[in-house]
Image (cartoon, rainbow, N blue to C red):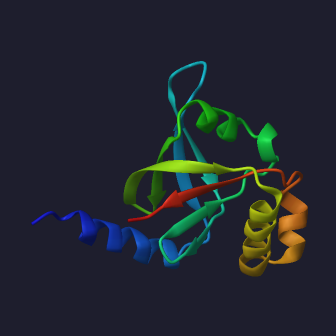
């Protein structure tokens, strides 16, 4: 029996109690691992990320090149392949999820462009 589901449950448990996680992406030019703290929304098995400067965000540009990211929620980690979301209706839906979790004012204060989102399947 694999211990992967238990590890995933631990990660989902930590995600459900966290406001911020660390993601690690591979630099598109340097090839180095770059870690950044980000806000997120977890809904069922879907983890939504919203780049602060939309498609101009550096980690987003790196993910365009390599869609594998590492998620770290206070020590519970997973490597996942992400799906990039550029459809305006879907991006708006993600923005609304962020506003519901973090508050409209904080989303307005920290996020400057809403043209893309990132989705990771947590299974």
Which residue is drawn at the image coordinates 9% and 66% (left, top)?
Answer: 1
Which residue is drawn at the image coordinates 43% and 51% (left, top)?
Answer: 80
Residue 46 shown left or right of residue 123 in the figure: right
Figure check: 91 above or below 113: below
Quarter of the figure with residue 91: bottom right
Q: Count the marks.
A: 0
Residue 4 shown left or right of residue 30 in the figure: left
Residue 9 shown left or right of residue 3 in the figure: right
Q: Quadrant of the C terminus?
A: bottom left
Q: Nearer the viewer, residue 69 or 84?
A: 84
Q: Nearer the viewer, residue 72 or 87?
A: 87
- Residue 64 percent coordinates (x, y): 63, 35
- Residue 32 percent coordinates (x, y): 50, 26
Q: Nearer the viewer, residue 117 or 27?
A: 117
- Residue 3 percent coordinates (x, y): 18, 65
Figure check: 67 above or below 87: above
Which residue is drawn at the image coordinates 85% and 55% (left, top)?
Answer: 114
Residue 121 shown left or right of residue 107 in the figure: left
Which residue is drawn at the image coordinates 15% and 63% (left, top)?
Answer: 2
- Residue 29 percent coordinates (x, y): 61, 19
Q: Residue furthest left?
A: 1
């Amino acid at each position: 029996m694999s211990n992967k589901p238990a590890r995933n449950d631990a990660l989902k448990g930590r995600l459900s109690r966290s406001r911020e996680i660390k993601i690690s992406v591979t630099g598109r030019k340097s090839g180095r691992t770059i870690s950044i703290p980000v806000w997120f929304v977890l809904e069922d098995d879907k983890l939504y990320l919203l780049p602060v400067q939309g498609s101009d965000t550096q980690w987003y540009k790196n993910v365009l090149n390599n869609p594998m990211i590492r998620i770290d929620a206070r020590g519970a980690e997973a490597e996942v392949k992400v799906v990039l979301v550029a459809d305006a209706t879907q991006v708006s839906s993600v923005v609304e999820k962020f506003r519901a979790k973090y508050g409209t004012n904080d989303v307005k204060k920290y996020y400057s462009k809403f043209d893309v989102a990132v989705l990771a399947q947590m299974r």
